[in-house]
Amino acid sequence: MDSALNQLIDALRRITQAIRLSSSVVQDTLGITGAQLFVLQQLAETPRASLREIADRTLTDQSSVSVVVSRLVVAGYVSRKTAAADARRTELSLTAAGRAVLRRAPELAQARLMAALRAVPVAQLRVTARVLHEASRAVAPASERTQMFFEPPTGQAREVAARPRAPSRGKARAKKAKPRP
């Protein structure tokens, strides 16, 4: 039991660290969150998608995806338009700026994670999902909606991608300490 538990906790740590690092690289190089890049990638694969379709593609609650999409619209990376065939449907599309961000984007850990999990037999996924669901209920209230990986909750953190920003050149930005009098 201890060996299996150790393997599980270690795997969760590696997954969390990989996603955190990946999101950090995206933030530093593109000025957007990993979640925002993930949504942009899904929109590139499904042009003129609805919010529901993007939520399905990202395996995320529609309200959580809506927050991310709203930030991308404000940043000028995504546009919203009413569908010509159905006025009740809103279509999301990448803008030229959104396509430019994707051309510079690194690979995301969460995309690799989803691809790896899609390759696992369904029976194994069901068991894993039940175990992780029970563990997550012990750690976090189930009543709260989950956010996309490392996406700041609405109104809590600074607005990420409020405006497009030039990519960094990969140089660390060190803050100079002010001399004390």
Image (spheres, rainbow, N blue to C red):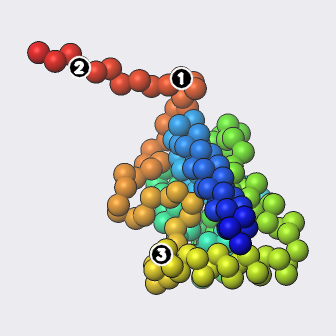
In the picture, the quarter occupied by the N terminus is bottom right
Viewer can see residue 20: yes
Residue 147: image x %, image y %? 52, 67
Q: Residue furthest front?
A: 2
Q: Earlier in the sequence, mark 1 or mark 3?
A: 3
Residue under pointer 2: 178
| Of marks 3 and 2, the one in the foreground | 3
Quarter of image, res 60: bottom right
Image depth: mark 2 or mark 1 in front: 2
**Of the residues shown, which amino acid type is indicated by label 2?**
Lys
- Location of mark 1 (residue): 171
Residue 122 lies in quadrant:
bottom right
Identify whether 177 is placed above or below 70. Answer: above
Q: Which mark is residue 140?
A: 3
Q: Earlier in the sequence, mark 2 or mark 1?
A: 1
Give the distance between the C-alpha atoms of the residues marked 2 and 1, in whole angstroms: 21 Å
Q: Residue 145: where, in percent of width, then height? A: 49, 77
Position of residue 13 measured from the top left corner of the image (x, y, whole percent): 62, 56
Q: What residue type is disc 1 on? A: Lys
Tell me whether the residue at label 2 lies in contact with that at label 1, contact meaning CB atoms closer than 8 angstroms.
no
Is residue 53 or residue 107 the one in the foreground?
107
Tell me, yes or no, if residue 93 can be seen here: no
Few, some or many C-alpha atoms within 10 Å of disc 3 (few <14, some 14-19, many ≥20)?
A: few
The Cα–Cα distance between marks 1 and 3, rounded to whole angstroms, is 37 Å
Q: Quadrant of the C terminus?
A: top left
Local secondary structure at mark 2: loop
